[in-house]
Image (cartoon, helix red, strand yellow):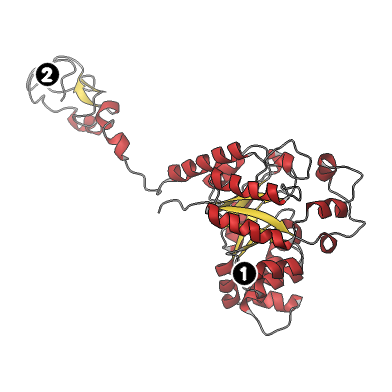
């Protein structure tokens, strides 16, 4: 079985800084870097954050610390009309357009665009009404799991299972648990949902990455699991692919030094392009799992391996002793495993040192 192709998502996010021109440039950069998908964020700032909501520490470091989260989000909001231009540019560049909704109106808008899939961010993993609405819409979903426990992920998936199965029972905790136990609902879930492991810190220290959690989630939920990479560089993304990540999401920016909440935890287009090439190389290197000589190494077998040769001069018919034969290169003669079966037998002919036995 050959390794499957990893879905690579260039997370443009809010790195457009509220500028449609920059957003279009990010679409171009993602396409040129070889990403499969370019992703944005769709939200109404007033529906997303209350006026008292504070910024995360990383947001305070990368933007005006005195600015409220609501004010920052208002600056970074893309109008719905901009989405049409971005979708059109993505189509021209041959790259899939994706976005993350943060409120019900934004979700309804994205569903109306008939996108191939929807992404829900880690912050909304516990937002059960929004998750249920995604499932009721029948959308294919990538669900990010930063900050979550295994139990919280299971709870989110039970909400989705209820929504995808269109259970007649009204939404409730009991109805969600019943859907989780229902094989048909779980099958509907499996047809629509994949998970992303991530750590919600920007940038994420490598000590907090915990890539081994991907296997835990895959075993627990029997769903495809990818990785949303918030670390510096992209080496952790390569490790995730080697560990079976089905999707890699990585922030893309035009300038890491720009002011904004996500620029510093992103990579620029040239580095993103190197990441894509490296991921494709890792996929190729994973191979099919069959342990057998490859075409490129077959010619080296006689050169690198050894065969049995005489260690000293022997007369024809002379009984071969333990010190009389030895394994040396090349490997084109009798294999060394025959060493013991030759001890005590007569030499088949006169042999000089290094003559093949």
Q: Judge whether 106 appears above or below 20 on screen.
A: below
Image coordinates for residue 255, horizontal then vertical, percent: 70, 38
Displayed quadrant of residue 209? top right
Residue denoted by label 1: 139
| Mark 2, other Cα within 10 Å: few <14 / some 14–19 / many ≥20 | some
x 31%, y 34%: residue: 297
SS for tag 1?
loop
x 68%, y 50%: residue: 23
Mark earlier in primary sequence (1, 2): 1
Whether residue 149 appears in this view of the structure is: no
Whether residue 293 sits left or right of residue 37 in the image: it is left
Q: Judge whether 332 appears above or below 113 on screen.
A: above
Quadrant location, the C terminus: top left
Whether residue 209 sits left or right of residue 328 in the image: it is right
Image coordinates for residue 114, horizontal then vertical, percent: 60, 68
Q: Which mark is residue 353?
A: none
Image coordinates for residue 338, horizontal then vertical, percent: 22, 33
Image coordinates for residue 348, horizontal then vertical, percent: 8, 26
Displayed quadrant of residue 101? bottom right
Quadrant location, the N terminus: bottom left
Residue denoted by label 2: 351
The CA span between labels 1 and 2 is: 77 Å
Q: Judge whether 24 appears above or below 311 on screen.
A: below
Q: Judge whether 109 appears above or below 260 on screen.
A: below
x 56%, y 63%: residue: 222
Residue closer to the observer: 160 or 259:
259
Circle 1 or circle 2, nearest the eye: 1
């Amino acid at each position: 079985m050959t390794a499957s192709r990893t879905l690579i998502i260039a997370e443009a996010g809010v790195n457009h800084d509220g500028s449609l021109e920059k957003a279009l440039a990010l679409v171009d950069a993602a396409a040129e870097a070889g990403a499969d998908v370019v992703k944005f964020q769709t939200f109404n700032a007033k529906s997303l954050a209350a006026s008292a909501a504070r910024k995360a520490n990383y947001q305070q470091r990368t933007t005006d610390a005195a600015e409220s989260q609501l004010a920052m989000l208002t600056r970074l909001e893309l109008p719905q009309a901009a989405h049409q231009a971005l979708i059109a540019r993505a189509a021209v560049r041959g790259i899939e357009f994706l976005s993350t909704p943060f409120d019900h109106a934004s979700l309804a808008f994205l569903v109306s665009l008939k996108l191939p899939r929807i992404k829900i961010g880690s912050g909304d993993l516990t937002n059960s009404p929004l998750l249920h609405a995604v499932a009721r819409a029948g959308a294919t979903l990538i669900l990010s799991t930063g900050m979550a426990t295994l139990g919280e992920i299971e709870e989110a998936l039970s909400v989705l299972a209820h929504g995808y199965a269109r259970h007649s029972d009204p939404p409730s905790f009991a109805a969600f648990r019943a859907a989780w136990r229902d094989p048909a609902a779980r099958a509907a879930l499996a047809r629509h949902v994949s998970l992303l492991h991530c750590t919600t810190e920007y940038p994420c220290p490598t000590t907090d990455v915990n890539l081994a959690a991907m296997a835990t989630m895959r075993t627990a939920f029997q769903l495809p699991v990818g990785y949303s990479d918030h670390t510096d560089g992209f080496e952790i993304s390569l490790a995730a692919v080697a560990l079976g990540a089905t999707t890699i999401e990585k922030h893309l920016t035009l300038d890491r030094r720009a002011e904004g909440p996500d620029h510093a935890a992103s990579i620029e287009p040239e580095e993103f392009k190197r990441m894509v090439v490296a991921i494709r190389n890792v996929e190729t290197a994973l191979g099919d799992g069959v342990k057998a000589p490859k075409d490129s190494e077959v010619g080296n077998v006689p050169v690198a391996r050894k065969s049995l040769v005489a260690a000293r001069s022997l007369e024809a018919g002379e009984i071969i002793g333990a010190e009389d034969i030895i394994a040396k290169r090349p490997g084109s003669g009798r294999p060394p495993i025959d060493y013991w079966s030759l001890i005590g037998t007569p030499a088949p002919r006169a042999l000089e040192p290094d003559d093949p036995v």
